[in-house]
Image: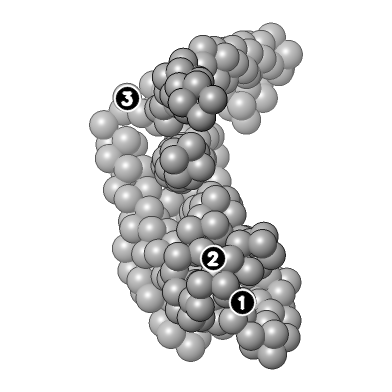
Amino acid sequence: MTAVAVAGVGETAARSPRRWPFRMSPIRVFAPVVVFVAVLASWSLVSHVLLDPQSRFLLPAPEQVVAKGLLDPMARSTIVTALWSTVQVALVGLIIAIVLGVAFAVIMSQARWAEYSLYPYAVVLQTIPILAVVPLFGFWFGYEFSSRVIVCVMVSLFPVITNTLFGLKSVAPAEHDLFTLHGAGRGQRLLKLQLPSALPAMISGFKISGGMAIIGSIVADFFFRQGEPGIGRMIDVYRQQLATEELLTALLLSSLVGLILFWLFDFLARRVDHAHGLRRDA
């Protein structure tokens, strides 16, 4: 009877399809492409048909944006150089925000008094109007790289804290009881139970913070007009010059960087989900 049951379980496991974290259904590729084509078609329709010829410089057609913003060597070089400066600031700020956010969330998850003491200030950090404090950072820390990084950290820190804390506190009580039964200490419980269980929520916070770090870097570039120019300063220059093609190119490339960061964290989330699935099957 037992042998039959074991054999049945083995046959079921053999028949169960292996789950691959990299498999992508056709709809995940086809649907965004359809939307992209529809947006380009609508954009072209507005530029070529709906807008008055004298006002078409306000929204040039997609082919004009590509020709002047990407294919022109001088414009492309200027935009790419400024974008790289912005990306560097955003990546450094994002890494610092992740380290600090995870550390604060871990501290708050270990003691109620720590959560009650620190979490309100995390909320305050999120509600401070960034446009009001950016000039102050320039006065206090100068207008170079470090001040821009501080702006990025301030903008992107809160999602990391909240999502990590949520994940750390969402462990099932039964799993905590199992660790207590085996005499696990606080450190073992954190490293082997809470942090692995919190990884999906943590990565969700990283996804949000990645895009916000790009925004924070652009805002800092826009206000800090000293040092190496970033994409925020170039956007302001193109706005003053009514260079709409270059302006749209800078905006689209900035959005593309944020999208790439989102995809990277989404890929990481899929790997984590796949690993959790394999552990559950084992």
Q: Is residue 52 left or right of residue 272?
A: right
Disc 3 is placed on an element classified as helix
Measured as percent of width and height from the top left, residue 209 is found at 54, 57
Q: Quadrant of the N terminus?
A: top right
Which label is found at residue 71? 3
Residue nearest the viewer, comparing 105 with 263: 105
Residue type at mark 3: give it.
Leu
Q: Is residue 4 left or right of residue 163?
A: left
Q: For marks 3 and 2, give the one nearer the viewer.
A: 2
Measured as percent of width and height from the top left, residue 142 is found at 41, 82
Measured as percent of width and height from the top left, residue 93 is found at 43, 66
Which label is found at residue 169? none
For disc 2, the marked residue is 194
Residue type at mark 2: give it.
Gln
Residue drawn 50% across the image and 85% down it: 139
Q: Is residue 9 left or right of residue 85?
A: right
Instruction: Look at the numbered discs 3 and 1 and tell me whether their residues touch, using CB distance below 8 Å.
Output: no
Residue nearest the viewer, comparing 245 with 102: 102
Q: Quadrant of the C terminus?
A: top left
For disc 1, the marked residue is 109
Residue drawn 26% across the image and 31% down it: 73
Q: Is residue 176 above or below residue 269?
A: below
Instruction: Look at the numbered discs 2 and 1 and tell me whether their residues touch, using CB distance below 8 Å.
Output: yes
